Image (cartoon, coloured by chain):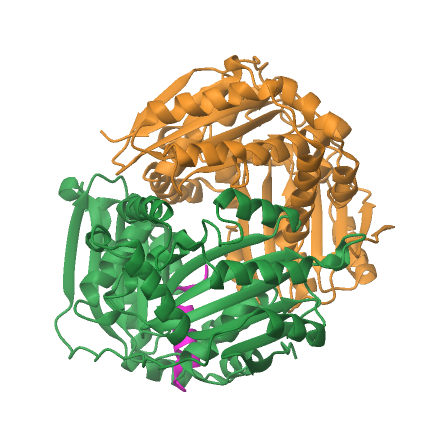
Amino acid sequence: MNKKGYHQIEETLFHEKLNNGLDVYLLPRPQMSKTYAIFSTNYGSIDRTFIPIGETEEITVPDGIAHFLEHKLFEKEDRDVFADFGKQGASANAYTSFTKTAYLFSATSNVEENVKTLLDFVQDPYFSEQSVEKEKGIIGQEIKMYDDQPDWQSFMGTLKSLFKDTPVNIDIAGTIESISEITKDDLYTCYNTFYHPENMTFFIAGNFDPDSMMSLINENQNNKEFAKLEEIKRYYPTEPMEVAEKEIIQNMPVSVAKCTVGIKESHDELKGEKFVKKDLLQDMIITYFFSKSGQFYEQLYEENIIDSSFYFETNLDKNYGYSIIGGNTDNPDQFIDKIKELLLSTSSHEISEEDFERMKRKKIGQLLRSMNSLENIASKFIHYNTVAVDYFELIPTIQSLTVDDANQFLKEWITDDRLGVSKIVAG
Amino acid sequence: MVTIKEEVKKYNGLNVHFVPNEKFKTVHIVVKFRAPLSRETITKRALLPYVLQQGPNKYPSRKELQIALDNLYGAVLSIDGGKKGNSHILSFRLEVANEKFIPNESNIIEEAVGLLNEVIFHPNIDGNSFQEQVFNREKETLRQKIKSIVDDKMKYANMRLIDEMCEGEIYQTHVSGYEEDLSSLTAQDLYQYYKDLLENDQIDIYVLGDIEVNKMEQVISSTFKREGNQKTEKKVETDKSPSSKEVKEVIEEQNVQQAKLHIGYRTNILFQDSKYPALQVFNGVLGGFPGSKLFINVREKNSLAYYASSRLESHKGLLLVFSGIAPKDYQKARDIMEEQMTAMKDGDITNDELKETKDLIVNSLLETLDHPQGIIEMLYQQVIADTRISPDQLIENIQKVTLEEVIEVGKSIEEDTVYLLTSKGGE
């Protein structure tokens, strides 16, 4: 077991790669009452084309299957795993994103029992035709719930406008039609390929003893056998640099129109230093312009173009990245034209030394805030770990950034062909 | 046990609660203003946060205020209003990085306290009025916010249920205020009301984090000052419980994909009542967790919904049940939901269900104590209910609840209103 101390932030992280390939990370936080554990596979909704384990031909599976599989893993032949956690005083949950599926629990007692339950239920699937059919009704209602949420539709509309082939333009849950095609055998195929320990990470943070925790996990894993896994062959389409469609308009019964301008930040694979630098600068720079201290925000506010619904978000993942600037507006075209105009003006902008120092401070404070939450630490750690970046080293990385880095980034940040628009209008 | 330390001091007409705690990397300062909830003042109280967030006298624009916050390592300021029973609470929250974790910094917390004091007590005024321009602009912001409630169907259905259920009661008052009040409201009116609030509201300040109480005491007492003591404490009135009546059914149609079924019950038990812990357990068995009766029967057994749960309005004495269903399943879903309540009232609760639910409630209370805002809200419950129940006691009280007590509270729960938001024609 490796031990690594991060002195400035007073954290210690333990790591071991087990014989079966599983990466295990332990972060003791003895002051906390609770322990939070997450068992995550490097498999999400965008992994729809791949060669199944032990086979040679690539296949494409129905959309929404990673999420469907996440639901079904909780159901066993004789019981529901939620109930097992419930009996052990833990609350369990799971989520599926574009790139990850994660199972988790938090508990303030019976931590060791709950760790075993988490490892065992994820590694012991039981799918039947009957239970697959039953789930279609439940997930159907989950999809319908999202269909009524203008904010979600606005978000997906933006991704559809930005990405032509990368499957982030498809809803994580799929559609009522696509999930209707899912069979028990499809679930086993995806499960056997992507739930191999080699493709998974176990992260636990909170109130426990690291030595006994690591031996418990080792013992649990040594009792199980897994087929040998060569590298998983997944196929992502080649994504062009420019947007798929300039504008996507959807009609929904909204009281005020919702508009976004999206920036296609990245369309191919990034890792390590390149990733982290882009990730940090992308966030710091959009914040610099559009947060309430930003000169663009002030201008938009004073010209009455935005209201309190105004927001921006930014995200960079292993093979795609986007930023979204949006809000409610009575005048969508004015909103869009103005945001685009401002964005296009940034290439000639110069950030001052003083402003950049403040941007760094803000980012450091934001990281410290996010470290209050074990949930946040765990999911962010895994996110960065997948692209070979150490989450706990982000503060020194921020400190090492220079104003020249920022101005260099700014020169190439925006081009017109990487801007897309989504509108939700009444009708 | 867990033991959250809380030292309460009184100075300058303020109740100050120090909560030293080593769990977090940031310090939280929360200032709470409490007054009786009322239709007359609510729109003003809803508008104030928007106006004050545009910057105090010292930083008279949103941009200048935000730059000051950014310089304090991205301190986060938020102001919000909410109701707890028949009280209305305005909360000013500031979260700032603890200087302990940042090299060469020692003054951040003190400066943050100073900034919060500016925002609350030294607003940007023009004689006896808020700045006209800021005021008019923020009035529009609030108007948009009120208008867009209908776009969030879950929130809208919740509000409509309370409208119908608590007709004529104080609790019915909408926390976002009323559009019809806005046009006649002036910047002078709002400033007058603001002065009234400074004099007459009950003010509680919470300071939480890895802090030295002595040092913080000095900072707080030399910064926050109220002119004189709280003048007239306005009494929070309780609504008379309506005499029992037929269950009211309200069906509303809109252009939606998914119907929202919300059912309101009167519990006739409040947070400070000795029966409250048994009511919490009752709610937990019914619909508080994924193993609860509602989840199992509506979702798992009948595949009717993605979510089906219940929660308590603890300072008002309500139990609310809600689910998102296909419009055609209304009667079936309603029957199943009501059957769960009837079953519980008939004593259909096993010892296993009881034990599990108690463990899960204790777990969630303990988890709340790992979140800074959670701790503050939990401690503030005591102020609202005028009780002295420490978090340790809350947990102990849950552990002591017996099956008989849970069945007993069922007797006082009465179904009041069934609200359905459904698609046009219910298809």
Give how far across and how far down residue A199 sits, in percent. Answer: 70, 36
Q: Is residue A22 above or below residue B414?
A: above
Kindly report the secondary structure that dominates the magenta region of the rendered protein: helix
Q: Residue at x 40, y 24 (%)?
A: A336
Query: Which residue is nearer to you in this view: B229 or B236?
Result: B229
Say whether residue B296 is left or right of residue A10. Answer: left
| Quadrant housing residue B415 | bottom left
Q: Is residue B93 above or below residue B275?
A: above
Is residue B392 or residue B381 the one in the foreground?
Answer: B381
> Which image quarter is the N terminus of chain B in?
bottom right
Front residue of this view, candidates A205 and A158:
A158
Q: How many marks?
A: 0
| Foreground of the two, A83 or A110 | A110
In this picture, residue B69 sits left or right of residue B427: right
Image coordinates for residue B40, horizontal then vertical, percent: 23, 66
- Answer with the quarter of the image where residue A331 lies: top left
- Tell me if residue B181 is in the magenta stretch: no
Q: Give the answer, above or below, for where A251 lies relative to A23.
A: above
Residue A186 visible to the viewer: yes
Residue under the point 65% across and 47% down: B71
Magenta stretch bounds: B273-290
Decide if residue B66 is on the left or right side of residue A15: left
Q: In the image, what residue occupies the spot 62% across and 76% down?
A: B4
Whole-percent x, y for residue A176 in the image: 36, 33
Identify the chain drawn in green. Answer: B
* Residue at 15% across, 57% down: B250
- Quarter of the image with the C terminus of chain B is top left
- Where is residue A371? Give x, y as percent: 67, 53
- From this viewpoint, is residue A98 visible? no
Relative to B401, residue B18 above or below: above
Colour displayed for chain A in the image of the structure: orange
